[in-house]
Image: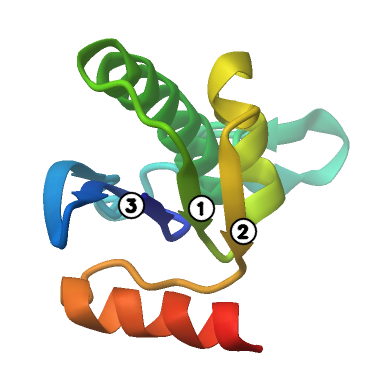
Amino acid sequence: MILTGTQEAEFYLAGDGVIEKIETFRIPRIRYSDKEGLSVRTGKTGVTGGSSKTTKEQYQQEFTAKFRTAAKDIVGRVTPTQIVLVSPIVGEVEALLPVAVKKIVAMRIKKNLCERHPEEILEHIKKTIIK
């Protein structure tokens, strides 16, 4: 089971009535001191100071890199038979999975359930199945 938000991901192994968190990561909030990272437009000279990347782009790039690495590492350690993908950005996250793993995604739920108790996560999945 893979749960993500936009800045965090949790990987669970579930089976035989047991659910266990096997991996997690969170992209820390980017904080700028004073005017660091601030871009200022000045007349005809263009943009001066700071980074040309937006904070959102920086988060996306860092999340993408960490997610791909974690997913590849986990698939190397554990051989899942099916995957439940829970994320507010399901399509984007599924695109980051290795090809072999994409084939075993059994359920997609568009919701952010990161940092929830495993029993609460399972209840949401059951409700989705019943619908």
Residue at 62% across, 39% down = 94
The relative height of residue 95 versus residue 65 in the rendered view (above or below) is below
Q: Amino acid at mark 2?
A: Arg
First reached walking from the N terminus: tag 1 or tag 3: 3
Q: Residue 36: x and y, percent?
A: 36, 43
**For residue 96, side relative to residue 34 (left or right):** right
Secondary structure under badge 1? strand
Res 38 visible: no
- Which one is in front in this view, the residue at disc 1 or the one at disc 3? 1
Crowdedness near tag 2: few (<14), some (14–19) or many (≥20) residues, C-alpha within 10 Å = some
Q: Is residue 66 above or below residue 20?
A: above
Give the percent coordinates (x, y) of residue 105.
Answer: 58, 41
The residue identified by callout 2 is: 108
Q: Which residue is mark 3?
A: 8
Question: What crowding class fits label 1: few (fewer than 14 Cα within 10 Å), some (14-19), or many (20 or more)?
Answer: many
Q: Residue at x 59, y 48 (%)?
A: 106
Residue under pointer 1: 85
> What secondary structure is found at the residue carrying circle 3?
strand
Q: Name the one closer to the observer, 22 or 58.
A: 22
- Kindly identify the residue that appears in the image at 26 percent across and 83 percent down: 120
